[in-house]
Image (spheres, rainbow, N blue to C red):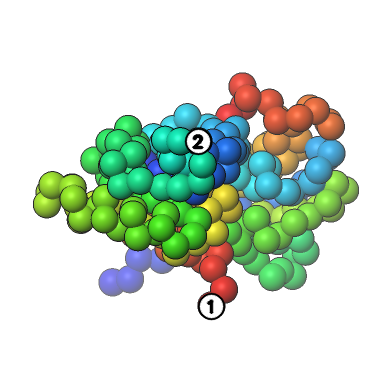
Amino acid sequence: MKDHTATEQATDRAELVNAVGLHARPSVKLTQLAKTFACRVDIALSADGPWVDAKSPVKVMRVKAPRGAVLHVRTSGPGAGAAAEALMALVRGGFGDHTDQPADLSHG
Amino acid sequence: MANVGIVIVSHSPKIAEGAADMVRQMVGDSVNLAYTGGDPGGGLGTGVASIREAIDRAWSEAGVAILVDLGGAETNSEMAVEMLDEERRDRVVVCNAPIVEGAVMAATEASGGSSLETVRRTAEELSPQ
């Protein structure tokens, strides 16, 4: 007997609203958040991909998306819905950045 | 399980400190971090003893990944690792990666609870293939 229980999946997208877009510090935050979920987490700049493993610091750092770009997320596995929601909340919240201010130590 | 710790070894104390600042500001406080660089006279250099002390400061049961710049930084780090107790020696690696980017990437990987081997692989992803 095969178990046909569907794998939990989610997709969502959000515009990069922070000043620098997906650059060094935001990339690190996104990777760190993705790693807190057990499910697979991929991101892309287009719904057609190419999709990048959001848990890979090096791959996420190479995405380099500017402010105004739309970041797509695709998750699969346990907690997929919560993971997509959390990642998009991070993007919509501007990664906790405050516009053009220098690094904010309190956000680590 | 504890996160892998990071050690930064540069000939220049300013580079070592600056790279460590970047790790702290970008990655946060969830990984142990230590840096060392320069000789006692204020010049450029690295020393086995000070690298050993840095490994002790950054020590984690999950291991320690060392990021180095050039030549002596690497060979002195390898010597420092060899001088560790057998029980610790296998849990310290010198990464073949650019020092600043490697330290930030390794620390990011470590902050997610990844193994020492995964941390090393992430840092080394940056090197030319």
Question: Residue B13, which numbered label?
Answer: none
SS state under label 1: loop
User: The disc labelled 1 sits on which kind of residue?
Assistant: Gln
Q: Which mark is residue B42?
A: 2
Q: Earlier in the sequence, mark 2 or mark 1?
A: 2
Question: What separation in Å lies between label 2 and label 1 (alpha carbons)?
Answer: 36 Å
Location of the C terminus of chain A by quadrant is top right
Question: Residue A33: x and y, percent?
Answer: 55, 41
Q: Residue at x 57, y 34 (%)?
A: B21
Q: Is residue B83 left or right of residue B106?
A: left
Q: Residue B8, image x and y in percent?
A: 45, 45
Give me the residue at 54% from left, 68% from top: B127
Secondary structure, mark 2, is loop
Horizontal side of A14 relative to B8 (left or right) equals: right
User: Which residue is tagged 1?
Assistant: B129
Tell which subunit mark 1 falls on.
B
Q: Residue furthest front?
A: B41
* Picture layout, residue A61 above or below residue B112: below
